[in-house]
Structure formats: structure tokens, C-alpha cells
Image: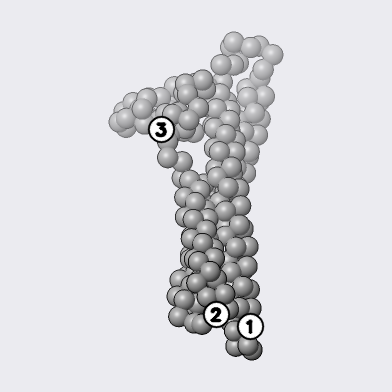
Amino acid sequence: MTDVAADPELTASDLRRMIETARWHILRYDALRASIANRASLLISGNALLIGGVAILFPNTVGQDVAGGRLTLVALAIGAFWVLGCSVFSVIYATKALLAGKSWRELYGQEPPVSLFYQHSDTMRVAPDFASFDTAFVEQTLGRERESATVNLWVVLQAHNYRYQFLRRATRRLQLGLVVFAGSVVVAVALSLIKLWS
């Protein structure tokens, strides 16, 4: 931890500037977190539409006389299950992008020090009641606040990276599901037309 008393090179002004810089980045990553949540929600909605498309396409195709007979229906069923599998995994990954299943301490360990007032889990563990919270707040030095801001900035960077990985996986599964679904629609329509014209 760096405090004005511990490092005479740093002035109170230097520490305030560092704190403000960290806060700016924290706010920026909060906006990115909101963006990831919006994208994950969009992916979940896209998957709902894809599942709805399978629910409409497959039963309608089964009820029609298509060229290729049972072999075509088996191929379309495999495509339908493939699309549903892609959607299920896409939704799972999108929900992981929305909210981590573990606390950041479980994910990243005890390496970063306690981050009072910037990390709610640390703050509630150190100051579970108002009296201890008030005391900790009043006794916080500029150096400790700078350290807490830096820890929080590191945590939001790690969390953004963690969530973004799941968002990418969810997107790839949705894209793959869409390609297979589009191919299934083309095959179903083409085979229906072939049967109709023959």
C-alpha cells in the first residue's frame, strides 16, 4: 500500500489524481458490463426465436410428403436436434456472461488486498454493521482509498474478460445454430418443391 507518509514522493494531489483515474476506468468498465448484459440478453432472445423456428419447421415438415422420405426426415431431425443443442449451450454461456457463478474472490483468490467501499463483498465482510462501516470509512486514508480503487479496477478488468469469453462462446453457438437452421429450411423447402413438381 502506498500512502503519503510511506512515500514522500507522492503528494495528496497525486493520490487524488490516481483515485480519480481509477474511478474513471471503473465507470468505463461498468458501462462495458452493462453492454455485455445487453448483448447476452439479445443472444438469449435470438435463441428463443431459433428454438421457436425449430418448433414450427420440424413438425410441419414431418407432416408433409417430402422427397427422400424417411431419410430426409431423419436428416432434418438431426438438424433440429443440432440447432436445439447449439441454442441450449448458447443460452448457458449467455447466462454465464450475465452473472458469474462464483464470487470474484473464489475466481481470483486472495491475491488482491481488501478493497473497502469499492467491492461490496469485501466491505460487508470487514464492516458488517453500521458502526464498523462508519469507523472504517472515517479512518480510510488516501493511500488506502487509492489501493482499494486499484483493486476494484483490476477486479472489473478480470470480470469483464471472464464474462466476455462466455459471450463469445454464446455468440458462436447461436451463429452455428442459425447456419444449421437456415440450411434445414432450405432443404425442407427444396425437397417439398421437388416432391410437388414430380
Place of residue 142 in the rendered image (x, y in percent of width and height, measured from the top left):
55, 23
- Look at 58% across and 12% down and name the residue there: 5
- The residue carrying pointer 2 sits among few (fewer than 14), some (14 to 19) or many (20 or more) residues within 10 Å by Cα, namely many
Say whether residue 130 is visible: yes
Q: Could you say whether the residue bearing mark 1 is in a helix, strand or loop?
A: helix
Place of residue 96 in the rendered image (x, y in percent of width and height, measured from the top left):
48, 46
Q: Tell us which disc is closer to us: 3 or 2.
A: 2
- Look at 63% across and 39% down and name the residue there: 24
Place of residue 59 in the rendered image (x, y in percent of width and height, measured from the top left):
45, 75
Question: Outermost residue, bottom direction?
Answer: 197
| Residue that mark 2 sits on | 66
Relative vertical location of residue 136 with respect to residue 36 in this rendering, above or below:
above
Relative vertical location of residue 180 with respect to residue 15 in this rendering, above or below:
below
Label disc, if present, on residue 121 of the rendered structure:
3
Label disc, if present, on residue 194 of the rendered structure:
1
Q: Could you say whether the residue bearing mark 2 is in a helix, strand or loop?
A: loop
- For the residue pair 110 and 141, the one nearer the viewer reads as 110
Relative vertical location of residue 146 with respect to residue 33 in this rendering, above or below:
above
- Look at 55% across and 71% down and name the residue there: 72
Q: Quadrant of the C terminus?
A: bottom right
Q: Is residue 4 left or right of residue 134?
A: right
Callout 1, which amino acid? Answer: Ile
Question: Outermost residue, right direction?
Answer: 9
- Dot placed on the residue nearer the N-terminal end, 1 or 2: 2
